[in-house]
Image (spheres, rainbow, N blue to C red):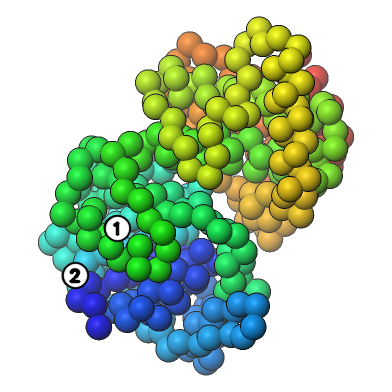
Amino acid sequence: MNKENILVQGIGAIGGLLSASLILKGYKVTLITGNEEITRAIRSDGIQIRNKTDTLSFHADVYTDLDELPKAQFDISLLIMKANNVVEIAKETIPYLTSEGYMVTMQNGIVEDAVIEGVEDPKRVIGCNVVFSATMHAPGIYERTSPGDIYIGEMDETITPRIKRLGEILNDINPTHITQNIRGILWSKLATNATINSLGVITGQKLGEMFKSKKTRLLTIQTYAEVIDVAHENEIKLEKTTADPYLLYMPKNSGRFTRFKKDFIVKMVGRKYKETRSSSLQSILRGRPTEVEFLNGYIKAHAKTTEVPINSALIDMIKEIENGKREIKPDNIDDLIQKIEN
């Protein structure tokens, strides 16, 4: 048994897969689900990993809420819940950490600054980007659905003994890289999520259907460019994970060939990932709020002189959908175009 006492909070698709993988490798893991149905399922049948040939099941110490546990015992907490809840949960987690214990943020949007401000201690937070995807077939049953690596880094860009040890732990279950530019990694992921996730919310379409539309492909490229321009304005050096972050970037005043090339790339993305559905859309369909404030909202908040009309309009439209004042439909693309042209 490995010595670290690990707390995993948020046992959805990624959290469930990582938890089961850690248990399989002999780590001491405690799960906080935040969901009674998932807790009951894991207590009854174990936490399960499904693959192409069979399903593996492991016993897990699982609870619904933190207050069911004794305090000050965990060396590492993996925070894998939605961005909307992460700051409050991070605050609640501090008493359950040892004096040297820390939290690893694993959200879609950029939450690290807000978490550090909330817990009032930057040494308690390590940034992380999970590139692969997973699904939860039913409460407690998980399957990996795509390849991909994990990237971790100290927020002050140093290489510390603890980041090296965390790298060893995570590399035991998935290829993991330590970076001295975790912000660059997080911004690269933000560019994709703020673009594809948010357009997916307003259209309600899977990627393949959404990118059949030329006007939607153009909006995709323009939305993405706003994010990259704001990153440049904030002196962020973007980093490559699964793809070059500049692959979809189209600078202002680009020529006809560049416009054609970028449109072709988006079209190919739609063909390759045609069955992919926006995770933010899935949240809406389950009656939950999106993470738009940590995606497009983060971009708008960090835009100094860069204009971000598309990201701003997407925030407004998604909030209208959340509040029941706007339907999810492909025609929302026309409304978005009208909003940014006025």
The C terminus sits in image quarter? top right
Query: Residue 282 location, x and y as percent?
Result: 68, 56
Q: Quadrant of residue 5?
A: bottom left
Q: Which residue is mark 1?
A: 167
Query: Residue 88 location, x and y as percent?
Result: 38, 53
Disc 2 and disc 1: Cα gap in Å?
23 Å
Query: Residue 58 location, x and y as percent?
Result: 45, 87
Residue at horizontal 60%, vertical 48%? 290
On residue 72, the disc is: 2
Foreground tag (2 vs 1): 1
Tell me which amino acid carries mark 1.
Gly
Position of residue 197 in the picture relative to residue 28 (left or right)? right
Work out whether 116 lies above or below 234.
Answer: below
Position of residue 253 in the picture relative to residue 27 (left or right)? right
Residue at horizontal 63%, vertical 35%? 195
Query: Residue 174 location, x and y as percent?
Result: 42, 63
Position of residue 65 in the picture relative to residue 97 (left or right)? right
Residue at horizontal 43%, vertical 40%? 186
Tell me which amino acid carries mark 2.
Ala
The N terminus sits in image quarter? bottom left
Work out whether 317 lies above or below 172.
Answer: above
Binning the other alpha carbons within 10 Å of mark 1 as few (below 14), some (14 to 19) or many (20 upward) gives many
